[in-house]
Image (cartoon, rainbow, N blue to C red):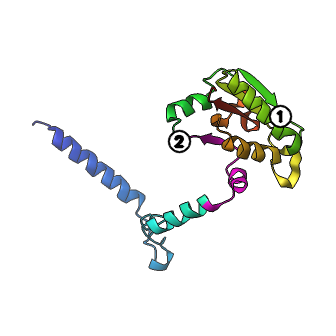
Amino acid sequence: MFITRHSLLENTVTDEDAEFRRAMSGAKPLKRSERAPHAKPKPRAKARFARADERAVLAESLEDDLDVIEQDSGGALRFQRQHVGRRTMRKLARGGYSVQDEIDLHGMTLAEAKPRLADFIDYSATQGKLCVRVMHGKGLGSGERGPVLKNAVNRWLRNWDSVLAFVSTRQVDGGTGAIYVLLQQN
């Protein structure tokens, strides 16, 4: 008599079936009311915004005041002229340009800071400096007003032609309390 692999599997299954039946011999089926409810399948995820909603959100964001946008965005500043490329911005954000000069505006009033910053930017550009650092602070001492000097520096630099781009610095260079400024040489 030959024992085949198939017959061994049948015996194993039969032994397991018999053991299961012995273990369940005293079990009684649950009443329908005692059974766990069947979980309904979750509905498929739907897109949160239709195209019209996305356009409305974009239009609304473009209408917001710059100060409100910066306070809501976590404090990182970023600006570039149209002709400044992504690679240049990536290099600037990573601290890839050597900082050739810096100015610290901490503790200054707006009236003190604007002319000093303007002179610094003009002088640096005429000296042929490509990248400078401006330390404006995070505005932690401004209380509920938020970062007053930081937001003012953001507005001023955007309006000066010699400024090609700027971005908040790496954490080791001041994080969101300072910016790298890329200058156009005069």
Is residue 59 on the magenta stretch?
no
Label 1 environment density (alpha carbons within 10 Å; few <14, some 14–19, many ≥20): some
Identity of the residue furthest to the left in this view: 1
Q: Residue 181: name its quadrant.
A: top right
Residue that label 1 marks: 116
* Residue at (49, 65) in percent of width and height: 49
From which residue to which does the magenta span run?
63-82
Q: Residue 162: name its quadrant.
A: top right
* Of the pair 163 and 74, the residue shown nearer to us: 163
* Of the pair 176 and 167, the residue shown nearer to us: 167
* Residue at (68, 44) in percent of width and height: 159
Where residue 99 sits in the image (x, y, percent)?
A: 69, 22
Q: Which three-letter amino acid code belongs to the residue tagged 1?
A: Arg
Q: Which three-letter amino acid code belongs to the residue tagged 2?
A: Gln
The label on residue 82 is 2
Label 1 secondary element? helix
Label 2 secondary element? loop
Visible residue check, residue 172: no
Q: 131 left or right of 38? A: right
Q: Quadrant of the C terminus?
A: top right
